[in-house]
Image: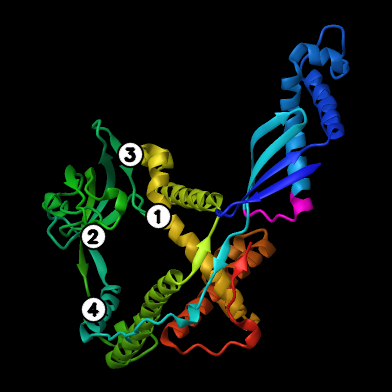
Amino acid sequence: MKIQVERKETCEALVTIEVDSAAVESAMQKAARRMSEKQNLPGFRKGKAPYSVVLQTWGEDAILDEALDVLGPEVYRQALEAEKLEPSAVGTMKRIVSRQPLTLEFLIPTQPVVEIGEYRAARVPFESPAIPDADVERAMEQLRESQSLLEPVTRPAQKGDVLSVDAKAGILSADGKLDPLVFEGESNPQDLDLDDNLGGRYPGAGPALEGITEGETRTVNLQFPDTFPIARLKGRKAQLTVKCLGVKVRRIPDWDEDVVKAVSKFNTVEELRQEVRTSLEKRAVEAREEEYADSVIEKMVEGAAITFPPAMLEEEIDDEIQTLARRLEQRKTSLEVYLRTVPEGIKGLRTQLEPDARRKLIRRLLLTELVKKEKLEPSEAEINEQVDVYQSVFAESAGKNKNRKSMEETLRHLAANDVMSRLIVRRVVEIGKGAAPALAESQSPHPSGG
C-alpha cells in the first residue's frame, strides 16, 4: 500500500492511498459473494455463484462499489496507523482517483493548532460590584412575598390579581396558521400575574384580561417587541387564549418574628437583612468575576493563533442544534415546528448558529490549552464537596434510580466539570488582575497541536 499525505493549512490532511492489488482482489471476491447472497442467481444457491457469473450479472464497477464498503474503512484505518495521523473528527473518502491501480483519496481532519501566545499578559480593569440598599430591600420584599397566601375572590379580575387559567398560545405564521408556543416549565393549569405583561411572558396582553371572570374565555392578539429576550420571538405576532378557572388575590404578611423564622435561621429582621446583603454581595462578586473572566478570555483570544478543521466547526453546530432540539422538546414543541420560523430552514439555522459556535469552539480550544499550561486539576476534596451538593439536590431521584452506581458516576462527572469550570474562572481572573501565581519553568507557555 502506497500512501501520500498532503497537509493543509486548514488542519486537514489529503491522503492518497494506492491499494495493493491482492487486497483489492480479495475484497472484490468477498463483495461478489455478499452480492450473490442478497439476490438469487438462476442455477446457483445464495452465496454460491462463481465470481465470473456475478461479474457478468452486475459488472466490475458495482462489485468494486460493494467492496469499498468494507475495504475503504480498512484502508483508512491502516493509513492512519502507518502515518501516525490523529484525526480530530471522522475523515471522508473524497473520490476514487483511479481504478487501475485502485487509488483512493481521503480528507482527514487533523488536530487543531493552538498557539496560546503570551496569554498571561492579558490585562483588563476590574471593578468590585456595589450593592445598593434598594437591592437589599427588594430581596427582603421578595422573601416577604414568598410567604404570601393566595385567596380566591368571586369578583371580576383586577390588575395585581392572580389568574388561575388554562392557557394556549401560538405564533402566527405567514400563512395565518398558529405554531404552538409553550414557555419552559409552563403547564396547565397555571397561575398568571395580572400585570401589563402577564409576568413578562406576553407583552401588552394583561389589560385585555382585566375584568375576566371565572369560567370566561378570552383571546388576545399580541406582538413581541424587538427587545424581547427570546431571539426567535422578537417582532413576532402571537395569539393567547385564556380560560379563567378562578381569580385570586395575594395577601402579603407584615414582617414579624414568625415570618423571619419561616424564611431564615434568624430571629430578627436586621439579622436577616445583613445576611441578605452578604449573600447579594457574594453572588454579585461571582457574577462580576464570570463577566470579567469572559472579557479576559476575549483578550487572550486576540493574542492567540488558533486553527481548526472545518469538520470541528460543523460538529459544534450539530451540538448546538441538538441542544436546541432538546430545549424545544421540554417546551412541548419540536425542531421541525421551530424551523418553520427560520428563513431557509435547517440551512438558515446553521448559518445563524455558525458565529456563536465558532466563538465557543475557539474559546474551548484556548481554555483546554490554558488548563494544560497552568496544570489545573480539581482536588478530590473539591469534587467530593460538589458531589455532596448534587446529592442533596437529587437525593429523591437518586433514591428512586435503580442504577445507583451509574447515577453516582454521572454526579461525580458533573461535579468534576463544575469544579474545573470554577478553577478556570478563578485562574483567568487572577491572570487578568495580574495576580496569578508564578509558573514553574517547565510550565512556560508554548504552542501545541498538529
Q: Nearer the viewer, residue 434 or 163?
A: 434
For image coordinates 29% across by 77% down, the residue present is: 143
Q: State how far apart marks 4 and 1 are (Cα).
A: 38 Å
- Residue under label 2: 199
Q: State how far apart marks 1 and 3 are (Cα).
A: 17 Å
Amino acid type assigned to the residue bearing label 2 in the image: Gly
Q: Where is 296 relative to 343, above or below? A: below
Left-right relation of 355 to 371: left
Question: Where, quadrant-wise, is the N terminus in this rendering?
Answer: top right
Q: Where is 74 relative to 290, above or below? A: above
Mark 4 secondary-structure assignment: helix
Q: Earlier in the sequence, mark 1 or mark 2?
A: 2
Tag of residue 355? 1
- Residue under label 4: 138
Q: State how far apart marks 1 and 2 are (Cα).
A: 32 Å
On the image, the x and y values in percent for residue 149 come to 26, 69
Q: Earlier in the sequence, mark 1 or mark 3?
A: 3
- Residue under label 3: 343
User: Which range of residues does the magenta coloring cover?
Assistant: 80-88
Mark 1 secondary-structure assignment: helix
Q: Nearer the viewer, residue 374 or 230?
A: 374
